[in-house]
Amino acid sequence: MDLNLDAPHSMGTTIVGVTYDGGVVLGADSRTSTGMYVANRASDKITQLTDNVYLCRSGSAADSQVVSDYVRYFLHQHTIQSGQPATVKVAANLIRLLSYNNKNMLQTGLIVGGWDKYEGGKIYGVPLGGTILEQPFTIGGSGSSYLYGFFDQTWKEGMSKEEAEKLVVKAVSLAIARDGASGGVVRTVIINSEGVTRNFYPGDTLPLWHEELEPQNSLLDILSSTSPEPMST
């Protein structure tokens, strides 16, 4: 089997952004792959841009990292010049500008989320090509294919912070169950007028769906648990 270890690092990913009554919740899995090989099982795909704006990254790890680095630098300069923190809309439009102007070279889809005193909690999706979409919730990455119907049914306006975070964790765990390129742990970031809260959910604490196997310590545990009973005569 060819693992293709020379392939570009890709965060074949599940990323989620949800607004609630008072702020936003961002969530992501933690698997980074190189071909069929898992290069990093605990990567952090939610990157801080400013004190009040965060970015969920999917697609090429290198592309998304360089975009976030550029945007963080430009937003820092903007804050110094204007004397106040950048709004979520400013950060999202800057990402849109970089993505669109370099659309022939970048392979990354991004979700921008944050809170500011002018518009409150906002979520923007910036998919491949540099389009910008303001939405009450948005999903991205390879695992998002399994989540559209789920969000259509379960998302609702006016959710509490706890309801929104529970929805994000459930969505990412559902995608992990179906998508081979998503896995590891679930990280969430809650942003509101009170600040930022980061939470971490280890893989063995996530709910199991469908016919998922429970976490095992070794391959021998799996083999012994699935071996058939001896036939009786």
Image (cartoon, rainbow, N blue to C red):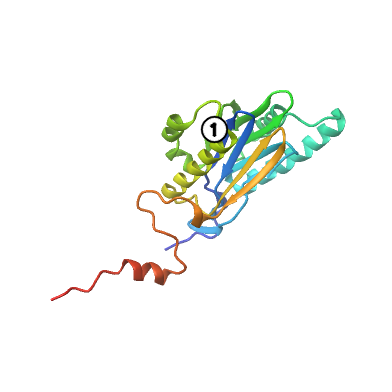
Q: Is residue 86 left or right of residue 229?
A: right
Q: Is residue 218 left or right of residue 43?
A: left
Identify the residue position indicated by label 1 in the image.
138
Mark 1 neighbour density, 10 Å: few (under 14) some (14–19) many (20 or more): many
Give residue 220's quadrant in the image: bottom left
Does residue 142 appear in this view? no
Residue type pointed to by label 1:
Thr
Q: Looking at the picture, how far across and down is residue 114, in whole percent?
A: 67, 33
Taking the view exactly as shown, the residue that stands out farthest to the top is 118
Figure quadrant of the N terminus = bottom left
Q: Is residue 209 visible?
A: yes
Count numbered badges in the picture: 1
Q: Is residue 88 above or below residue 189?
A: above
* Residue ranking furthest to the left: 233
Viewer-nearest residue: 26 or 205: 205
Query: How far across and how far down the image is residue 27, in percent?
Result: 57, 42
Viewer-proximal residue, 87 or 22? Answer: 22
Residue positioned 48% across, 41% down in the render: 171
Q: Secondary structure at mark 1?
A: strand
Q: Position of residue 74 (x, y in %)?
A: 78, 36
User: Where does residue 131 sit, x and y in percent of width and height?
Assistant: 59, 28
Q: Is residue 229 left or right of residue 38?
A: left
At x 24%, y 71%, the residue is: 229
Residue that appears at 63% across and 50% down: 44
Quarter that holds the C terminus: bottom left
Q: Residue at x 43, y 40 (%)?
A: 146
The answer to which quarter of the image holds residue 51 is top right
